[in-house]
């Protein structure tokens, strides 16, 4: 018998928090609901979860700041933002922080469950399919995917879960065209406009991390995707 997926919900709205936590339990998820973001952070640091659902607009600490704090100690924990804010800049900010999804209020409970189930099933399948050896020498760098660490000489860059998955995907397809749709469907779970914008943000992150080795290049193929090169001629 497979264990239940364990979710932490950080939502300060009493009515919505109660409704979502009870509905998710009814759908056979194990749920811990925290109303205070600081308490939510402490709970995340002391327990293991498969997914975090974070409200964006909360007192004391907003969801964006909370996500940054989570990333310092639990970079592998995927998270979804819930928000009443619909500005494109907010959506892109959420994805740039590593969000795996972004749902606008009022929340459709059935849609939320479908998205969570699809996301967690994909993550579980990805882990089962992941080869035993998932570490890579990348030019002067070394990627230890199991711990989400990128090494350059004596420096260590701690990657987020999505940065790690993206770099591993690119490194395993060195000098091949990695199409936008293939990357998005594999890592984001959906090929759409906002996820494509998020992908571009993460490519920028990786380029910055890898800039110390000039032999590495993530080449943009307009309208198609990216080619990850470790040796190229200008």
Image: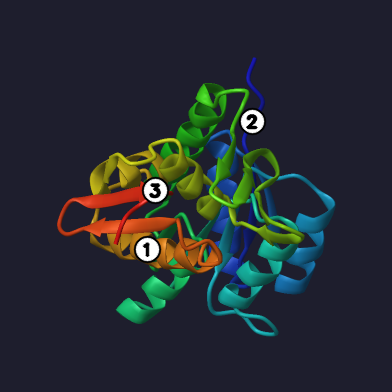
Instruction: Measuring from the top left, give residue 178's x and y in whole percent.
Output: 29, 43
Residue at 60 percent across and 58 percent down: it is 18
| In the displayed structure image, the side of residue 15 where residue 153 appears, left or right | right
Q: Residue furthest top?
A: 1
| Residue displayed at 62% across by 41% down | 145
* Mark before the other along the chain sequence, 2 or 3: 2
Q: Which residue is mark 2?
A: 4
Q: Which residue is mark 1?
A: 198
Spot the residue most to the front.
Answer: 233
Q: Position of residue 40 (x, y in %)?
A: 74, 64
Label 2 CA crowd tier, 10 Å (few <14, some 14–19, many 20+): few
Residue density around tag 3, few if under 14, some if 14–19, many if 20 or more, within 10 Å: many
Residue 188 is tagged as: 3
Q: Secondary structure at mark 1?
A: helix
Is 92 in front, or is 208? 208
Q: CA distance from mark 2 to mark 1?
A: 29 Å
Residue 93, picture quadrant: bottom left
> Is label 2 or label 1 in front?
1
Gap in Å between the C-alphas at discs 2 and 3? 22 Å
Q: Are marks 1 and 3 in contact (CB under 8 Å)?
A: yes
Above-or-below relation of 105 to 184: below
Count of marks, rendered view: 3
> In the current view of this chain or complex, which residue is farthest to the bottom?
60
> Which label sits on residue 208?
none
- Mark 2 or mark 1: which comes first in sequence? 2
Sequence-wise first label, 1 or 3: 3
Q: Is residue 180 left or right of residue 104?
A: left
Q: Residue furthest right?
A: 46
């Amino acid at each position: 018998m497979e264990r239940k997926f364990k979710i932490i919900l950080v939502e300060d709205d009493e009515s919505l928090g109660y409704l979502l936590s009870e509905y998710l339990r009814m759908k056979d998820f194990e749920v811990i609901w925290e109303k205070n973001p600081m308490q939510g952070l402490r709970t995340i640091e002391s327990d293991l979860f498969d997914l975090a659902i974070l409200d964006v607009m909360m007192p004391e600490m907003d969801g964006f700041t909370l996500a940054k704090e989570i990333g310092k100690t639990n970079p592998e924990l995927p998270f979804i933002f819930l928000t009443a804010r619909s500005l494109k800049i907010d959506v892109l900010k959420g994805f740039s922080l590593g969000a795996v999804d972004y749902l606008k209020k009022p929340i459709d409970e059935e849609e939320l469950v479908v998205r969570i189930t699809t996301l967690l099933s994909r993550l579980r399948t990805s882990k089962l399919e992941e080869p035993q050896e998932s570490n890579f020498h990348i030019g002067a760098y070394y990627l230890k995917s199991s711990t989400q660490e990128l090494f350059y000489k004596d420096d260590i860059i701690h990657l987020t879960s999505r940065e790690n998955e993206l770099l591993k995907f690119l490194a395993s397809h060195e000098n091949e065209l990695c199409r936008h749709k293939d990357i998005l469907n594999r890592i984001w779970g959906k090929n759409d406009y906002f996820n494509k914008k998020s992908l571009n943000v993460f490519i920028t992150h990786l380029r910055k991390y890898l800039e110390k080795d000039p032999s590495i290049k993530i080449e943009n193929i307009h309208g198609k995707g990216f080619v990850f090169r470790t040796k190229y001629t200008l």
